[in-house]
Image (cartoon, rainbow, N blue to C red):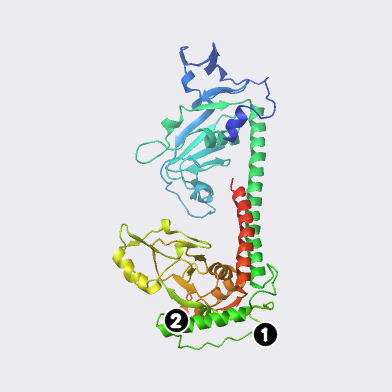
Amino acid sequence: MLLARHIVGGVPCMDSTFYFQWQYLITHINNLHYEKFQDGTVKCIEDEIPFEVPEGWCWCRLPVITTDIFAGGDKPDVYETCLTESCKIPIYSNGMENEGLYGYTNKPRVTEPSITISARGTIGFCCVRETPFVPIVRLITITPSKEINLYYLKTVFESLIETGEGSSIPQLTVPGIKPKLIPIPPVNEQIRLQNKLNQILNYIVNISFEKDELQNLLQIVKSKILNLAIRGKLVPQNPNDEPASVLLNRIHDEKEELIKQGNIKRDKKESVIFKGDDNSYYGISLPTGWSWTILKDISFSISDGSHNPPSNKEFGVPLLSAANVNNNSILINNASRWITNEEWEIENQRTDIEIGDVLLTIVGSIGRSAVVETNEHFALQRSVAVIKPCLISPFYLMRIFQAPQIQKWINDNSKGTAQKGIYLNALSIMTVPIPPLDEQLRIVKQISIFFEQLDLISSSLLC
């Protein structure tokens, strides 16, 4: 695309005093393009001309501007995988890794600066080869005339030559490449054009790097916002808010009533939480009105998905894993496994997933969280935990899970080598900071405002 734009305008002034020795091959007659053959006959090829080129340029077939075009042969008999005293000539194949370097041999097949093009696999991958080498199968070599700039010709192939021929297996072939029409500018113009393209490409690379850096910075800003939130420094405290200690007492009473009714079970394990040397958790001193608690004390239940899920079906109720839970979103439509409605009824007895539950990935890609906001049925595998908060904003709990201090705690308390995971017993005694309920809502709202603005910036960088 860059080359096409430069051909139709926007390049440095052309050297109109230079003419190619092969320019007679394709000429203009009555504003039409004709090709002249060795026997003197001419043929109108107007339908083959892709676009008009500036004055001083011309179109020609590839063989006219090359001294050799051929496909690589078999691997040489003399062959070493590494550079040795006797084998110093590189052998190239059609791979992209390490520019297709396959090994080394003792005699070159190509001694002039050339271009190689992958004909199969990584089709169309071009490289300039300025030192002697040996091409092997599926690698096309093009050796241009002295007047043709190698890098300009490489740009032509990358920009204008379609890649892939054949039916079931796409490939490039020498007979397919030879008839190609190549736009040729004067020699000095080739150099100026390539220099300009390199300048633009370097500019694009720099922009891309700066975009990546800015994307990373946006993630750091989000982490800083969550850090302020968990410390009680994101929004002002309101002395008229009901203290978190009162809220925790109400949560305790609510759970006791449900235990009496037989709706939930009492946790028989008593947990002891130790503060740090500075009499705080995570190095955080909470504002007035906040309280520390553990996750199970503010949850109706903490469970995980099936440890032995039913066999996969072609359709049905989605069976989600950690891969389907991103921060802030549940990718139900991206499910790769399904179960029947009858199987879902059985699986759902374990988790009873409903709106307002918080999902947390606990195996493999641990630490991602999202709130259930749909009545659509789905089941979970063991890589996802389901936390049912009691009188706590589920969105506040989700944001707390995403805070850097809690992310570190989750990673520090994960077990395993090949695939790390955190057990529910450990998760249940996670220490979390609880602000007054009204402040929880203000925190969630402020985070959403900030994150929405940051996401808009992030999206604009992708355009």
Badge 2: how crowded within 10 Å, few (<14), some, or many (20+)?
Answer: some
* Pointer 1 residue: 279
Nearest-to-viewer mark from 2 and 1: 2
Q: Is mark 1 on a helix, strand or loop?
A: loop
Give the CA separation, mark 2 to mark 1. 33 Å
Q: What element carries label 2?
A: helix
- In the image, 273 versus 287, the foreground residue is 287
Q: Name the amino acid type tagged 1.
A: Asn
Residue 261, horizontal then vertical, whole percent: 41, 83
Q: Name the amino acid type tagged 2.
A: Leu
- In the image, 407 versus 292, the foreground residue is 292
* Pointer 2 residue: 258
Check the image and name the residue furthest to the front.
Answer: 240
Question: Which quarter of the figure has residue 452?
Answer: bottom right
Sequence-earlier tag: 2 or 1: 2
- In the image, 23 versus 2, the foreground residue is 2
Q: Is any part of residue 47 visible from this angle?
A: yes
**Which image quarter holds the C terminus?**
top right
- Number of callouts: 2
Q: Is any part of residue 418 visible from this angle?
A: no
At 40% across and 60% down in the image, what residue appears? 376
- In the image, 138 versus 304, the foreground residue is 304
Residue 135, horizontal then vertical, whole percent: 47, 42
- Left of 14 or right of it: where is 136? left
Q: Examine the rendered structure and indicate whether residue 293 appears above or below residue 370.
A: below
